[in-house]
Amino acid sequence: MAVSSEVGTPPARASFWNDPRIRAIIFQILILGGIILFGIYIVNNTLVNMESRGISSGFDFMGRTAGFDIGMTLIPYDEASSYGRAFFVSLLNTLLVSAIGIFFATILGFIVGIARLSNNWLVSKLAEVYIEIIRNIPLLLQIFFWYFAVLRALPSPRQSFELADTFFLNLRGLFVPKPIFEAGFSAILISFLIGLVAVVFIARWAKRRREATGQQFHTVYVSIGILVGLPFLAGLVTGFPLSWDYPALKGFNFQGGMTLIPELVALTIALSVYTASFIAEVVRSGIQAVSHGQTEAAGSLGLRPGPTLRLVIIPQALRVIIPPLTNQYLNLTKNSSLAAAIAYPDLVLVFAGTALMQTGQAVEIIAITMAVYLTISLVISAIMNWYNKKMALVER
Amino acid sequence: MQYKMLVAAAALAVGFALPASSATIDDVKAKGHVQCGVSQGLPGFSNPDQAGNWTGIDVDVCRAVAAAVFGDANKVKFTPLSAKERFTALQSGEVDVLSRNTTWTLTRDTALGLDFVGVNFYDGQGFMIRKDMGIDSATKLDGASVCVNIGTTTELNMADYFRANNMKYEPVVFEKADEVVAAYDAGRCDVYTTDRSGLAAQRVKLKDPSAHFVLPETISKEPLGPVVRHGDNQWGDVVRWSLITMIEAEEMGLNSGNVDDMRKTATNPAVKRVLGTEGDMGKVLGLGNDWSYNIIKQVGNYGEVYAKHVGPNTPIGLARGPNELWTNGGLMYPMPVR
Amino acid sequence: MTDATPTFERSPDLPPPASTVGVVGWLRQNLFSTWYNTLLTILALWIVWEAVPPVISWAFLTADWAGTSRDDCTSGGACWVFIKEWFGQFIYGRYPIEERWRINFGSIILIVCAATLFFPRFPYKLWVSLFLIFVYPIVAFFLFSGDAFGLEWVETPLWGGLFLTLVIAIVGCVFALPIGIVLALGRRSDMPAVRAVCVAFIELWRGVPLITVLFMASVMFPLFVPEGLTFDKLLRALIGIMLFQAAYLAEVIRGGLQAIPRGQYEGAQALGLSYWKMMILIILPQALKLVIPGIVNSFIALLKDTTLVLIIGLFDFLGMIQAAGTNPDWLGFAVEGYVFAAFVFWVLCFGISRYSLHLERKLHTGH
């Protein structure tokens, strides 16, 4: 064999078919082409089918009058509103229950996760029993359980549990007074915002001073003082332009005030309790991932158990905890779609339910619904990724 | 048998079975059965027993179609559908006919790509309430919580009614009829609203049925009937005339008991046409001439079916009312079979 | 003569203080070490006292066990007669009673075959595994649906109960595995188009709730295919669940792939193995072993999620129980039904999760 390759000349090209780069390109073109063809095929089928069956298509329906009412609305809505507005009402309900659920699930999950590591045998066993029971039972079952347990435990409106004639709890929900903001209330709001900004600055200043001089500053107490004091002062000046709309028993039910419907309560409990059992495990493994030497080092520096946990263990554990925690938040949000089983007016029940039924446009509505959940998922992951980056270990 | 085995093998290998054709009637004949969408359990209309056999007047419409097409009322399979799924399932071809106490409305008949072929039950929406609430009229329901099934005309009628009477209400909307009943029974709502027949049927599922009653007002017209896909007129005709034949048979006094005798002895040409012994009524529908005889023989006439499933001697206990024949002052008016 | 020198005699050890050993010591150490620990203990005891006795009393002491109808439930506790009477329906759904032996038979084959895999010394493991993966699904298909070998045709709408739940979970997971592996490999591929497609697929399916996937599969699917082409409703739900599960498995498997040290890839390449040979012979066996616990966990999640099929009208275990609870003859026993469902799911999921822990320890061959 003659020496055909000299230094500087490219190696003899393999045959066209054996060049891995060309093969990769061809392979990718084939895959993309296949997927595009498949997509065209599906879309074409759908269009043909809808045409031949006389199903109307397009998104015009979003502007049409919905004609049905929704049990719980965060923004004004009535029967004369459009489907588009019904969509936003139900979307807000989904976001509301997810947000509340995430809040309580996090608190409960952290408590149980830390209790699981308690050196109190009974407490740690109780936490373990809680985790092992709750996370091995389907969520749908738990939602049914809580809904009917809540309904069974509550009295009818006429025999409501009441607290000081302002809070009422019965089968129709929890009724609380609704604040009515009168003219001049903005002063209180503005003073609160000013306080908030001040607190942020104070906290930054305190941190810088601590790093420079080691002196501690009671940021927490000062912040609370500012956040409560400033609005209170503003209130004194303006004479508290705020009144309350109290719920009152009228006819069948309480009128006025704000209502937390039992479906929301049951769904929140079920979602938080269920997700908390997973968060607890996340928290436990996160804390256990922090090596014991850290605790010992903190101890030998003279830190008490409280500050050790707060200043040494948790900041390090959070790094391990956050990625799986994000997953749990995502799961909770997606699981909130089970609301449909117990009449909580969320996106799936109202939009992918009633609206789908009344318009018959399944393709458009299910596509929008899926897109909404997908967007929520992507936004939550994006936020958590950003936070994760911020919290990540800065190695020197 | 051999064919079904092949289909099973194909289903295993590729994952689907494909009898392809555009006309529903050819599809149905190829499949060997009528696929019928029914409710998930509404006593008297379509309800499975413990062994999974479906009964009810909606079920019998489908059995009549099967009898007309195959000469065997049992060649029908039922797909339980929620109110939410039902139209999509019909549109998409999942079922051939939807017989699920569905109200005939303009939008459903047009924009949803459906065709209603008749009415097998004239109904109206009512309200059920606890006796101890002391309410005697629907006009006093201001501020009430109302339990209702999702995706029904009921949901819209209720909104209209409360709005027209300037009353407020809180809708509590459930996916499944059973959940509505359970929540109403648990006291979540003051009122349960659906078609009056539905109220009568669901009342047997309450813990203490006698503690509840139905308010006198009927707030809507609910003509319930079988539905087919829009655009397949031949199949629509088959379903329509299967239903009409049941009513016509009652008017002519034909029933499952006397139909064999009548077939031999009848002299009235109108009756003979219905029995398929004169004229070619089946041919023009694309069926055998004994199609109507099979319906009456195997399923019965409308009156029989009504009495068997929802009539006064059943737990549902509904009087004929508007569902009486037109000759008796009701609304059931069969088109002439001619 | 007496020896005057006093001998030094070691006095016996004193017993440890009574407060540090035995029951008392254990209690002190574990329950009452500090004042807040004591407080926590008391709180915990109170919770136990409030929660446990009423449940035991309801479920056992005052429960009714014997009888055949609701009239036999008189004692005020749980009415297990309801479960007993409907037990067959809960397990087999509406599968014809005289054909139920087929399900039993199929399950026994599966259990026996699977059990042999648990014996470390069983010699024919490879053959049993191959049988389970390639032959058993076909056998089970014909056994359960029939219309072959003289068996009667049992359509899928009659399938139900725990049987259906397990069919969905097992089929969903087993068939999702190969798709998941391909997706995971695709996500780590060097080819940008392949990677983009896989990422999009995975994120799409992981981002939407299963309930919308099921709804799409159950009612919208026929709109996507040419007219006249029909799939069985159960099969459509299975396809939806399978794709959904594949996206989750892909992420689990990706974790395993990432955990394989770079040297393994380089070693395989140095030996001149092609991409597929490298993956199949070197990387995947190690990666899959690493992620077995993760796969088992997503199987548990799927098992719990199968309850959602009741929303699209399949009568799975929970669906059967709900249907039974609304039977006019058996009204008012929904709680017993739900408790029974919760118990069965709990036993299954808890058992599997314990087994996965055991596997994790057994397979841990790290250094």
Image (cartoon, coloured by chain):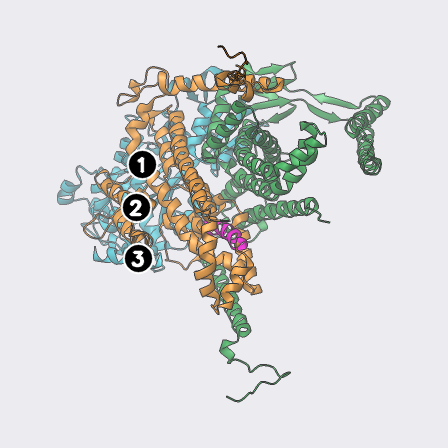
Q: Magenta segment: does it hold C253?
A: yes
Q: Position of residue A146 (x, y in %)?
A: 49, 27
Left or right: A205 as drawn, with respect to A57: right
The hue of chain C in the figure is: orange
Q: Amino acid at mark 1?
A: Ile
Chain identity of mark 1 = C
Report, in whole angstroms, how far the alpha carbon at label 3 lies from the one at label 2: 51 Å
Left or right: C133 as drawn, with respect to C272: left
Which stretch appears magenta? C244-259
Residue depth check, mark 1 versus mark 2: number of the one nearer the observer = 2
Chain identity of mark 2 = C
- Which label belongs to residue B297? none
The hue of chain A in the figure is: green
Identify the residue position indicated by label 3 in the image. B26
Q: Amino acid at mark 3?
A: Asp
Q: Secondary structure at mark 3?
A: helix
Is residue A396 shown above or below C6?
Answer: below
Q: Position of residue C127 (x, y in %)?
A: 29, 54
Residue depth check, mark 1 versus mark 3: number of the one nearer the observer = 1
The hue of chain B in the figure is: cyan
Is residue C329 shown above or below A353?
Answer: above
Tell me if label 1 and label 2 are in contact, CB under 8 Å.
no
Tag 3 and tag 2 share a subunit? no
Out of B57 and C295, give the one closest to the viewer: C295
Out of B232 and C240, give the one closest to the viewer: C240
Mark yes or no: residue B117 visible: no
- Which label belongs to residue C116? 2
